[in-house]
């Protein structure tokens, strides 16, 4: 297993290099930069702007800028944000726990709901229960997450059952430890359910299809013919049907920027989504690169978690990967 982890980590190096290099030069190809916006301010002289360019190394060739940034990024020194006037590492550290909380909780909620519901649909293929579950799955798969977010926000504003925006209430510090947890969960409900409901719909269909395929396999047919108890059959079905979906868990965990970003912006959840949007709009080079760098690492970590789970479930996977 140690060799398997090392092999995966070595594979991650070219991925990080490729993503950051391409992203850096795409940003540099965009017309202007954050310092160009300062030229519109008559109180800032050309000499000041030139000093800032030299201070941040923006007067050097693009490849030199990238190599210097990469050297610092290895030690997680991600530079200084032009817009927020603060270290990029500090800004990301403040936001990333909120995004991780949203992404991980929505992923776990989706899987906790999808596995039993999809399994029931697979075992009840062709029945009314199966058709009802499929109707839910098709409905929410065709519903964009941003539109569902608007619907849930409208529901929250009309009923007043859930708060809109933010992570905590104004009186958060006065609450007991249990009250603080409940307050965070109360604010988390709308963005979490937006992501979880959409994700659950697709996972249910995948779990259902996998369960049906396993139920029709010769192994299960043989077990049924031998009169094996239903609970034993269910155990075998789940073990064989879940292997292909373990990899998907990594992508669910690693959805901090892609899947969660738009929902964060719409629902007012202060995570990486709003931070990255502000950075892109203001052409804050180091903040954009820092967010992409951390996002890539999270994607790799998520995939590594999925690979480890899959290798733990099926040792043949790690033997094949490392040529053992």
Image (tube, rainbow, N blue to C red):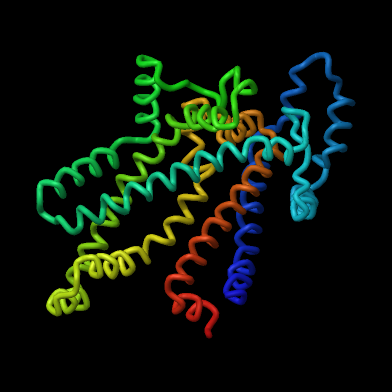
Does residue 139 appear left or right of residue 200 in this picture?
Answer: left
Front in this rendered view, residue 86 or 233: 233
User: Image point 32% across, 53% down: which residue?
Assistant: 115
* Rendered image quadrant of residue 100: top right
**Residue 270 rendering spot, x and y as whole percentages:** 58, 30
**Compared to 115, does 102 lie above or below?**
above
**Compared to 42, does 195 lie above or below?**
below
Instruction: Name the residue at the bottom extreme.
Output: 324
How many numbered marks, from 0 up?
A: 0
Does residue 16 appear left or right of residue 125 in this picture?
Answer: right
**Compared to 177, does 295 lie above or below?**
below
**Residue 156 rendering spot, x and y as whole percentages:** 39, 20
User: Image point 20% across, 63% down: which residue?
Assistant: 212
Asked whether residue 164 is in view, the answer is yes
Asked whether residue 63 is in view, the answer is no
Does residue 59 appear left or right of residue 140 in this picture?
Answer: right
**Residue 137 rendering spot, x and y as whole percentages:** 25, 44
**Residue 295 rendering spot, x and y as whole percentages:** 59, 48
Quadrant location, the N terminus = bottom right
Does residue 262 appear left or right of residue 130 in this picture?
Answer: right
* Rendered image quadrant of residue 159: top left
**Compared to 227, does 38 lie above or below?**
above
User: Image point 50% across, 30% down: which residue?
Assistant: 182
User: Image point 23% across, 43% down: which residue?
Assistant: 138
* Rendered image quadrant of residue 31: top right
Front in this rendered view, residue 231 or 130: 231
């Amino acid at each position: 297993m140690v060799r398997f982890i090392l092999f995966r980590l070595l594979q991650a190096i070219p991925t990080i290099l490729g993503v950051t290099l391409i992203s850096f030069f795409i940003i540099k190809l965009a017309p202007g930069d954050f310092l160009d916006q300062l030229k519109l301010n008559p109180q800032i002289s050309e000499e000041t702007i030139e000093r800032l360019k030299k201070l941040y190394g923006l007067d050097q060739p693009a490849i030199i800028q990238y190599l210097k940034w990469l050297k610092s990024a290895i030690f997680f020194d991600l530079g200084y944000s032009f817009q927020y006037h603060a270290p990029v590492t500090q800004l990301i550290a403040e936001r990333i726990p909120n995004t991780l909380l949203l992404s991980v909780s929505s992923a776990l909620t989706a899987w906790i709901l999808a596995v039993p519901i999809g399994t029931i649909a697979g075992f009840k293929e062709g029945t009314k229960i199966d058709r009802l579950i499929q109707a839910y799955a098709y409905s929410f798969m065709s519903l964009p997450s941003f539109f569902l977010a608007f619907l849930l926000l409208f529901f929250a504003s009309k009923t007043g059952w859930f708060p809109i925006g933010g992570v905590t209430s104004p009186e958060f510090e006065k609450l007991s430890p249990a009250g603080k947890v409940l307050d965070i969960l109360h604010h988390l409900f709308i963005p979490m359910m937006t992501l979880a409901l959409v994700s659950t719909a697709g996972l249910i269909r995948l779990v259902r299809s996998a369960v049906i395929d396993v139920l029709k396999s010769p192994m299960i047919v043989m077990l049924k013919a031998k009169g094996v108890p239903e609970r034993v059959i269910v155990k075998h079905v789940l073990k064989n049907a879940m292997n292909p979906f373990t990899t998907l868990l990594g992508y669910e965990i690693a959805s901090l920027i892609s899947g969660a970003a738009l929902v964060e912006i719409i629902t007012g959840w202060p995570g990486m989504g709003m931070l990255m949007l502000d950075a892109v709009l203001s052409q804050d080079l180091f903040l954009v690169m820092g967010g992409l760098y951390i996002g890539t690492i999270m994607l790799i970590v998520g995939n590594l978690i999925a690979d480890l789970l899959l290798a733990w479930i099926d040792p043949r996977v790690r033997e094949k990967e490392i040529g053992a």
